[in-house]
C-alpha cells in the first residue's frame, strides 16, 4: 500500500530539507505537487529509508553519494533490493562511513552481489602496500557492517568476521614490515598473539587490538640481535595498523609498557613463573596466535598452559579477580556509571569476569572450558553444569544484546565508545539503529530502555551470584591433581584424607558421579570440595555416607544440586553439618526440603515464641483428625529443630540462645497439642518445669511439666478431674507416638508426690498440698515453674501460688538447708550412672550442670523473697543477681558461669554429634574430636584439659558456697 501524505510518514523530521533532497531537483523520489512518491521504485526506496537508524541522514548521504558517483548509484538503489537494504542501512547508521563512501565514490560497488560467497579477509585483494591495505580494510569493513545491519550476520558472526579481518590486517602489516626490513626479518621469527577481544574472536568495530609478541632467533643468530630485529618489526607493524585501521596495544605483555616489546618463549616463561600476577593469567585466557609464525605462537601458548590452569590455586586468586572488577567500576566517572555498557555494573565486563573466573577455577580439570571466546566459554559452563541452564541462557542473551548496542554506538562515528547517550535525539537514533520502532504502548526509546534495564539487572544479579559464589574459593583450594583422579589414585587420596574405608568411599563417589547426566556433572564439581570438608571431620566416611543418603533422597529434585552449586554457602555448610552431626543428618533425611534453610542466614535465625505458636497452631488446625493434626505439629517441630541445630553447629547461636529457642519449640508444640486435646469449658494449663521452665532446654531434654486445671462451674470435682486426666494423657500419647522426628517425652515426675501422686490436680488441690505437705525439694523444683501452654489466667494464678512456696518469707531453716545438702550429696553419690566418669559427666559430674544449678537454687531459696533479681527461672540470670547483691564472690560467680555454659554447650554437642542423648564426655575418640572441632578446632586433649580445669574451679566454688 502506497502511503499518502507528506514525507514525515517516512520518518523524516526535517520536512523542508527532505522534500528538497527527494524532490525533482534532488533524487527525484518525491512529487511535491501530488505529495506522493514518483513511482513504485521510489516508494520502495522511501520505505527502506523509513527503517534506517536516521532517515534524514540516510537521505542526505545518499544524495551526496549520487552527486559524487553519478546516476548509476540512484538507478542501482532503485532496482537492486539487496544493494538498497545494505547501502541505506550503512548510510543511515554511520555518518563516518557515509563520508568515506562519498570520498571514495566507487566503493559502493562492494555492497553489490552475493556477499556470503566472497572470501573473508584479503584473499582477493592486493595488500602489499600500506595505502592498498588501508583501502582494502575499509572495503572489507563496509561489507561486514552491511551484513550486520541487514541481519545477514548476527552478532556472533559479526564479531568473528571483525576478528578475521583483524587477523588478516595484522598478517598483512607484518608482511609489509618484513618486506621493508628484509634483513631484520631474516634473523628472527615473530609470532603475533592476539589478546583481549581479538584473542577471544569477539572484536567490535572500534577497539584497540591487544597483542603479545613472541620471537625466536634464526639459526646461528644471537638472541639480543634477534630481539632487536623483532622489536623493530613489531613497532613497524603497530605503526602500519594504527594508520590503516586501529591502534595495536602491547601493554598486556610481561611488565606492561615498561617491559621488552618482544621476548623469547623462555623469557616469557621465566616471567610468568616468577612474577606474573593473577590478572595476567586471567588475560592469558584470551591468548590466541593470530599472525606471523603461528607454530611459534602455538608452542608459546602450550608452554604456558600449565601456568594458566594452576593460577586459580593461588591463595589470593579468587579475591584478586573480584577486587579487579571492583576497581574497574570505581574508575568510571559517576556521571557515566549508569550508562556504561562495557565497564559499568550490569555490563559486558560483569559477564566476562564471571565467565573467566569460572574458567580459571573449573578449567583446571575440565578442558572443554579452555576457550578464549566468552560465548563458547559460557556454553561450556552451561553444558558442564557449572552454570544453571536458565542463568546461562540469560547471560548469553544479555551478552549478545550488549554487544549489539556497543556495535551500534561505535558505528555512528566509528569512534571507541561504550556509553549510552543521555541526549534524547541521540537515544532515539540508537533505539532506531537497534531496530526499535514506536508502537501503541511505547515509543522506541522506552522499548530499548526496558530491554536494556532488564538485561542489566539480570547481569548484575547473576554476576554477583557467580563471581561471589562461596564454592569458588573452596574449589580453587583443591589442587588440580585432586580434581581428576584415576581409581587407584582416588583410593590413595581418600586414604590420605582420613577415610577409614577408601574402597567404600570410592563406591559412594562412583554412585554419585557415574554417567553423563547433568546431575552427575554437577556432583563431579561438588565432590572434590566436599571431600576436603569431610576430611576435616573426625569421621569422613560418615559425612560422605550421609551426603549420599541426602543426595539419593533429593537427587531427582530440580532445585537440589542447583542450590548446592549456586546459592551461597549451602554446599560447604551441608558438608560440615553432615560430617559432624548424626542428629542433623537424621533430621535432614526425614525432611530433605529443610536443606533450603542453609541458603539464607535469615533462615537460620530461630523463630520467636509467638511466631512458633501461630505456626504450630495453624499446622494443627488444617486437620480434623487429632493424630494427623499432631503429625503436622511434629513435622513443624522437626523443621525447627533442624534450623536450631544448624545455626548452633555453624556458630550463629550461643548456648543460652539455643536453650531459649528449643524451649520455645516445646512451648509451641505443647500449646498446639493442647489445642487439639482440650476439653471445652475446662480451664487447663501446662506449667513448664526443670530446663523447660528455665528456658534452658537442651536437645535431649524431655518436657518437664505440671498439669493444672480448674473445674467449670456446675461440674463435679470427680468429673472435672477425669476430664483433665483425659486431656493430659491424650496430650502425652499423641506426642509419644512412634514417628520419624526426635521424640518429645512429657514428664510430670516433678508433680507433688512424684510418680505416686495424681497426674493432674486442680489449683485448689495444689494449694492444699503445698500448704500442708510440701517438701523442700518441691519448693526447689518450683523455682523453675513457668506457664508454657493453656489458660494464661490459670497459669498466672498457679505461679502466684508457687511464689509463696519457692520464695519463702522466712527463707530456709537450718534443717531445710541440711536437707538440701543431704540431697545434693545423694545426687553426687547415687544418681551418677554406673561406670560414669565423675570428672567428665556434664550433668552430674564434678563442676557439671547439677553442681552449678543446685548452688544457684540454694541462693534463690534463701534470698529470693528479699532480692527481686533472684525471682527468675533462668540459672545465669539468678547467678548475676546473686553476684550483684553481694551473695556470691565475683570470681566464684565467673567460675560457675563458665562451667554451666561449658557443660550445657558440650551436652548439646554430644547429642548433635552422636544423634542420641548422652551426658558423658569421652576422654578420647571421634566424638571428643568432633566436639573439640566444633568449639574452635583445638586439639582434643587440649580441649579436654580445658574442660577439666573449668569444672575443677567450679567445683571448688560450689563447695565453698554450700559449706557456708
Image: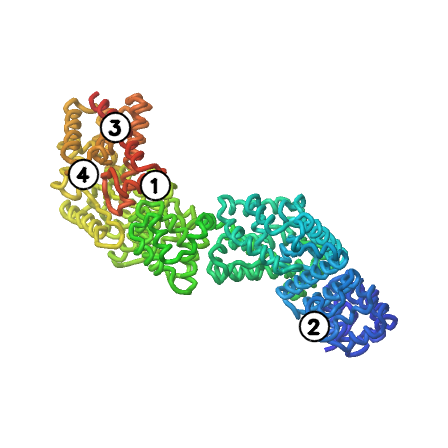
Query: Is the residue marked by circle 4 packed among few (<14), some (14-19), or many (20+) residues within 10 Å?
Result: some
- Please say if the residues under marks 2 and 1 sit with CB atoms less than 8 Å apart: no
Residue depicted at 66% across the width and 55% down the height: 218
- The quadrant in which residue 622 appears is bottom left
Residue under the image location 42 percent in, 52 percent down? 482
- In the image, residue 461 lies at what x, y percent? 53, 53
In the rendered structure, which disc, 2 or 3, sits on the residue that comes first in sequence?
A: 2
From the image, state whether disc 4 or disc 3 is nearer to you: 3
Kindly indicate whether the residue at mark 4 contacts the one at mark 1 (C-beta within 8 angstroms): no
Residue shown at the point (37%, 40%) measured from the top left: 653
Q: CA distance from mark 1 to mark 4?
A: 34 Å
Nearer-N-terminus badge (2/4)? 2
- The answer to whether residue 294 is seen in the rendering is yes
Q: x and y percent of residue 771 in the render?
A: 16, 32
Residue picked out by circle 2: 118
Foreground mark, 2 or 3, reads 2
Residue indicated by mark 3? 952
Q: Secondary structure at mark 4?
A: loop
Please tell me whether mark 1 sits on a helix, a strand or a loop.
helix
Residue wearing tag 1: 934
Residue pointed to by mark 4: 750
Quadrant into which the N terminus falls: bottom right
Residue 223 lies, in percent from the top left, at 66, 49
Vertical placement of residue 136 versus 727, above or below: below
List the single residue furthest toward the right: 25
Task: Report how far apart the C-alphas of labels 2 and 3 lie in the structure.
Answer: 91 Å
Amino acid at each position: 500500500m502506497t502511503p499518502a501524505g507528506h514525507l514525515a510518514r517516512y520518518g523524516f523530521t526535517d520536512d523542508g530539507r527532505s522534500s528538497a533532497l527527494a524532490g525533482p531537483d534532488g533524487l527525484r523520489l518525491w512529487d511535491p505537487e501530488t505529495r506522493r512518491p514518483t513511482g513504485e521504485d521510489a516508494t520502495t526506496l522511501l520505505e527502506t529509508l523509513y527503517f534506517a537508524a536516521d532517515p534524514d541522514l540516510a537521505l542526505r548521504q545518499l544524495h551526496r553519494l549520487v552527486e559524487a558517483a553519478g546516476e548509476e548509484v540512484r538507478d542501482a538503489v532503485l532496482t537492486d533490493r539487496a544493494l538498497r537494504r545494505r547501502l541505506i542501512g550503512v548510510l543511515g547508521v554511520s555518518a563516518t562511513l557515509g563520508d568515506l563512501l562519498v570520498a571514495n565514490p566507487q566503493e559502493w560497488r562492494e555492497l553489490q552481489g552475493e556477499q556470503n560467497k566472497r572470501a573473508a579477509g584479503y584473499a582477493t585483494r592486493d595488500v602489499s602496500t600500506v595505502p592498498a591495505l588501508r583501502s582494502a580494510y575499509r572495503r572489507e569493513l563496509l561489507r561486514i557492517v552491511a551484513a550486520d545491519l541487514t541481519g545477514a550476520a548476527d552478532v556472533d558472526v559479526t564479531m568473528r568476521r571483525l576478528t578475521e579481518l583483524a587477523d588478516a590486517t595484522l598478517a598483512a602489516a607484518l608482511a609489509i614490515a618484513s618486506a621493508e626490513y628484509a634483513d631484520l626479518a631474516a634473523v628472527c621469527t615473530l609470532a603475533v598473539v592476539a589478546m583481549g577481544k581479538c584473542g577471544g574472536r569477539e572484536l567490535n568495530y572500534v577497539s584497540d587490538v591487544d597483542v603479545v609478541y613472541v620471537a625466536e632467533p634464526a639459526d646461528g643468530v644471537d638472541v639480543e640481535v634477534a630481539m632487536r630485529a623483532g622489536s623493530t618489526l613489531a613497532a613497524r607493524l603497530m605503526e602500519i595498523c594504527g594508520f590503516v585501521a586501529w591502534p595495536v596495544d602491547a601493554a598486556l605483555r610481561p611488565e606492561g609498557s615498561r617491559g621488552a616489546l618482544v621476548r623469547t618463549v623462555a623469557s616469557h616463561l621465566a616471567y610468568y613463573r616468577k612474577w606474573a600476577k593473577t590478572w595476567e593469567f586471567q588475560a592469558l585466557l584470551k591468548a590466541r596466535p593470530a599472525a606471523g609464525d603461528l607454530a611459534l605462537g602455538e608452542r608459546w601458548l602450550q608452554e604456558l598452559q600449565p601456568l594458566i590452569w594452576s593460577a586459580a590455586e593461588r591463595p589470593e586468586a579468587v579475591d584478586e579477580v573480584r577486587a579487579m572488577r571492583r576497581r574497574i567500576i570505581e574508575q568510571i566517572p559517576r556521571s557515566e556509571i549508569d550508562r556504561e555498557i562495557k565497564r559499568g555494573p550490569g555490563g559486558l565486563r560483569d559477564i566476562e569476569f564471571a565467565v573467566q573466573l569460572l574458567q580459571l577455577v573449573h578449567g583446571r580439570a575440565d578442558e572443554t572450558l579452555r576457550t578464549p571466546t566468552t560465548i563458547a566459554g559460557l556454553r561450556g559452563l552451561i553444558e558442564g553444569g557449572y552454570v544453571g541452564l536458565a542463568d546461562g541462557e540469560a547471560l548469553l542473551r544479555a551478552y549478545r544484546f550488549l554487544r549489539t548496542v556497543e556495535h551500534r554506538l561505535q558505528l555512528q562515528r566509528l569512534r571507541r565508545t561504550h556509553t549510552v547517550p543521555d541526549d534524547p535525539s541521540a537515544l532515539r537514533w540508537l533505539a532506531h539503529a537497534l531496530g526499535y520502532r514506536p508502537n501503541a504502548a511505547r515509543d522506541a526509546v522506552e522499548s530499548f530502555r526496558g530491554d536494556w534495564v532488564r538485561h542489566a539487572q539480570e547481569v548484575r544479579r547473576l554476576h554477583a551470584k557467580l563471581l561471589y559464589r562461596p564454592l569458588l574459593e573452596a574449589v580453587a583450594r583443591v589442587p588440580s591433581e585432586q580434581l581428576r583422579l584415576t581409581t587407584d589414585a582416588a583410593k590413595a587420596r581418600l586414604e590420605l584424607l582420613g577415610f577409614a574405608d577408601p574402597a567404600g568411599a570410592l563406591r559412594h563417589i562412583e554412585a554419585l558421579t557415574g554417567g553423563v547426566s547433568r546431575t552427575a556433572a554437577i556432583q563431579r564439581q561438588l565432590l572434590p570440595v566436599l571431600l576436603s570438608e569431610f576430611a576435616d571431620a573426625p569421621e569422613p566416611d560418615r559425612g560422605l555416607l550421609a551426603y549420599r543418603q541426602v543426595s539419593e533422597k533429593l537427587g531427582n529434585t530440580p532445585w537440589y544440586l542447583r542450590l548446592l552449586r549456586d546459592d551461597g554457602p549451602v554446599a560447604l555448610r551441608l558438608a560440615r553439618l553432615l560430617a559432624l552431626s548424626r542428629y542433623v543428618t537424621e533430621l535432614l533425611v526425614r525432611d530433605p526440603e529443610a536443606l533450603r534453610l542453609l541458603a539464607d542466614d535469615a533462615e537460620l535465625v530461630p523463630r520467636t515464641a509467638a511466631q512458633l505458636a501461630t505456626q504450630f497452631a495453624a499446622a494443627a488446625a488444617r486437620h480434623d483428625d487429632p493424630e494427623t493434626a499432631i503429625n503436622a505439629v511434629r513435622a513443624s517441630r522437626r523443621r525447627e529443630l533442624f534450623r536450631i541445630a544448624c545455626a548452633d553447629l555453624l556458630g550463629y547461636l550461643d548456648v543460652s540462645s539455643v536453650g531459649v529457642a528449643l524451649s520455645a519449640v516445646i512451648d509451641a508444640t505443647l500449646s498446639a497439642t493442647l489445642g487439639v486435646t482440650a476439653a471445652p469449658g475446662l480451664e487447663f494449663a501446662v506449667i513448664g518445669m526443670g530446663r523447660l521452665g528455665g528456658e534452658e532446654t537442651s536437645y535431649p531434654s524431655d518436657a518437664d511439666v505440671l498439669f493444672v486445671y480448674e473445674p467449670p462451674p456446675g461440674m463435679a470435682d470427680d468429673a472435672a478431674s477425669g476430664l483433665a486426666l483425659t486431656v493430659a494423657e491424650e496430650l502425652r500419647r499423641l506426642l509419644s507416638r512412634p514417628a520419624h522426628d526426635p521424640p518429645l517425652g512429657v514428664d510430670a515426675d516433678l508433680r507433688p508426690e512424684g510418680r505416686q501422686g495424681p497426674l493432674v490436680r486442680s489449683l485448689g488441690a495444689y494449694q492444699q498440698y503445698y500448704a500442708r505437705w510440701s517438701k523442700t525439694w518441691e519448693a526447689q523444683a518450683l523455682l523453675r515453674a513457668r506457664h508454657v501452654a493453656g489458660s494464661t489466667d490459670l497459669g498466672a494464678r498457679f505461679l502466684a501460688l508457687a511464689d509463696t512456696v519457692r520464695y519463702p518469707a522466712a527463707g530456709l531453716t537450718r534443717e531445710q538447708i541440711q536437707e538440701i545438702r543431704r540431697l545434693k550429696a545423694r545426687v553426687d553419690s547415687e544418681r551418677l550412672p554406673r561406670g560414669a566418669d565423675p570428672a567428665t559427666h556434664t550433668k552430674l559430674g564434678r563442676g557439671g550442670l547439677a553442681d552449678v544449678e543446685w548452688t544457684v537454687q540454694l541462693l534463690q531459696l534463701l534470698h529470693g523473697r528479699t532480692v527481686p533479681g533472684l525471682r527468675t527461672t533462668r540459672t545465669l540470670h539468678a547467678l548475676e543477681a546473686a553476684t550483684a547483691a553481694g551473695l556470691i564472690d565475683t570470681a566464684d560467680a565467673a567460675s560457675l558461669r563458665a562451667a554451666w555454659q561449658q557443660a550445657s554447650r558440650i551436652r548439646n554437642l554430644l547429642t548433635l554429634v552422636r544423634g542420641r542423648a548422652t551426658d558423658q564426655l569421652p576422654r578420647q575418640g571421634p566424638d571428643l574430636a568432633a566436639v573439640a572441632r566444633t568449639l574452635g578446632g583445638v586439639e582434643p586433649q587440649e580441649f579436654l584439659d580445658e574442660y577439666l580445669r573449668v569444672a575443677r574451679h567450679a567445683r571448688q566454688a560450689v563447695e565453698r558456697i554450700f559449706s557456708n
